[in-house]
Image (cartoon, rainbow, N blue to C red):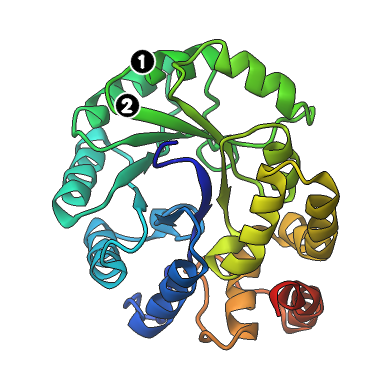
Amino acid sequence: MTLFNGLSAFPLTPTDESGQLLLEPLHNALEGIVTAKVDSIGLLGSTGGYAYLTEQERKRVLKVAVDYVAGRLPLIVGVGALTTRATLDLAKDAMETGADGLLLAPMSYQPLTQEEVFQHFKAVSEVGLPLCIYNNPGTTKFSFTPELIARIAELPNVAAVKMPLPSDGDFAGELARLRAMVPNHFAIGYSGDWGAKEALLSGADSWFSVIAGLLPEQALALARAAQSRNQLEAERIDRVFSPMWSLFKEFGSYRVMFAIADCLGLGTFSPPRPILPLAPQNYERVQEALLPILKLTS
């Protein structure tokens, strides 16, 4: 087991219209995650809107989260930034503030080469915290080759990769190919919540979960069923989530999560512009999808 095994829950970063962090909604989300006893918190991932925050805002969010969580769960923080210099500054701050691990996506305005990304990860790996490769071509437009993942996996402190869902749906095949290329301790996990059931049933080490940021108990029920290879139970729970997965795919999970927060009474806050919230009529669809999920653990 490593820091990056199991279910990692990724909360939103609630801010007001001026960009100020809203403490109570963040505390409430973190408390729900801690109480559910998932395996880790993934702070300032894509769901946390890290790309829309300044470096100082990100450092503030991390300090608030570290202080509030107070060691009750491991805390992984996203440190992706446009330059290696800024990324190193965020990574060093994470170590000093008390984060347990780092999540790094290769952000860039100019398209990056495989060698440039390797050197970027090499520099950040030297900070000393356990590091997870964030392979998210949907947002970064950079695709890691298996060979690059294997090369980065040999660097000190690099412990995991967060993979997108395989385009052909062959989780078992992809896991087998990657595991033949990386060290034994290296964890391979997936994002893309609608593929979590199949990924974990196929033997993935982790689920980096959007929905667990607001519905950690229900996500944990799905994760534990799939991890224990209880296929019938995992499929039953996943069917309950299915309408929500459809909304994630239609509107993007980021937008839908703000609507879920509103429906749960955690606060009415909007995604940072230019991202627009869901139209009012779509909130009804979110509520309808949410009700059966809430009954999973009632």
Kind of residue indicated by mark 1: Glu
The answer to whether one can see residue 15 in this image is no
Q: Are marks 2 and 1 in contact (CB under 8 Å)?
A: no
68 on left or right of 168: left
Residue 121's label in the rendered image is 2
Q: Relative to residue 89, is residue 274 drawn left or right?
A: right
Specify the quadrant of the image occupied by residue 102. Answer: top left
Dot 1 surroundings within 10 Å: few (below 14), some, or many (20 or more)? Answer: some
Task: Give the spatial CA distance, label 2 vs label 1.
Answer: 11 Å
Instruction: Work out whether residue 251 or residue 32 is closer to the camera in this orientation and state it.
Output: 32
Residue 134: horizontal and vertical position, in percent?
47, 37
**How far from the left and from the top, in percent, is residue 246?**
80, 59
The reply, left or right, for residue 275 in relation to residue 222 is: left
Residue 178's place in the image compared with 9, above or below, is: above
The residue that disc 1 covers is 154
Tell which of 23 and 173 is nearer to you.
173
Identify the secondary structure beneath mark 1: loop
Residue 244 in the figure: left or right of residue 217: right
Q: Nearer the viewer, residue 14 or 83?
A: 14
Kindly tell me whether residue 91 is visible in this rendering: yes
The quadrant of the picture occupied by the N terminus is: top left
Residue at point 81%, 45% (across, down): 231
Query: Image height check: is 217 above or below 234?
Result: below
Mark nearer the N terminus (2 vs 1): 2
Q: Quadrant of residue 62?
A: bottom left
Q: Nearer the viewer, residue 210 or 2?
A: 2
Residue at point 79% right, 60% down? Answer: 237
- Give the amino acid type for the residue marked by disc 2 in the picture: Phe
Quadrant (top left, top right, bottom left, bottom right) of the C terminus: bottom right
